[in-house]
Amino acid sequence: IWGESQHGMLGCAYPSSVDPNSTHLMSLTQPTLIEHLRYEDVVNIQATESHFTVLAKSGRVYKWGLNRDARLGLPVQSSVVSLPTLVS
């Protein structure tokens, strides 16, 4: 993944000096492996302006990004999910 994003949408760990809940704009200028998906064979990716959904060949689904109003459907309270999280 690469590009600029807010709200944890790049799916990689933020530097410890950055609060992922802030509106800080994170930038990756080169394609970067999303470590949490290293061992998954990704077959489909859906990207919106606020979050990502990934389908793996195994059938597992991962989501991350802006979680306002629990829109990611994950059992987390945080308004931002900055790492790919398995949907159970």
Image (cartoon, rainbow, N blue to C red):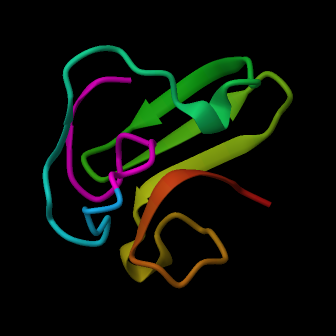
Left-right relation of 7 to 34:
left
Position of residue 86 relative to residue 81, above or below, is above
Magenta-colored span = 1-15
| Helix, strand or loop: magenta stretch | loop
Residue 48 on the magenta segment: no
Pick the quarter of the image with the C terminus.
Answer: bottom right
Pick the quarter of the image with the N terminus.
Answer: top left
Which of the 4 quarters of the picture holds residue 74?
Answer: bottom right
Position of residue 23 relative to residue 41, above or below, is below
- For the point 35% across and 15% down, the residue is 31
Which of the 4 quarters of the picture holds residue 23?
Answer: bottom left
Left-right relation of 22 to 50:
left
Return the x and y of residue 27 as percentages of the image width and height: 18, 36
The front one of 48 and 11 is 11
Left-right relation of 71 to 42:
left
Return the x and y of residue 52 as percentages of the image width and height: 45, 43
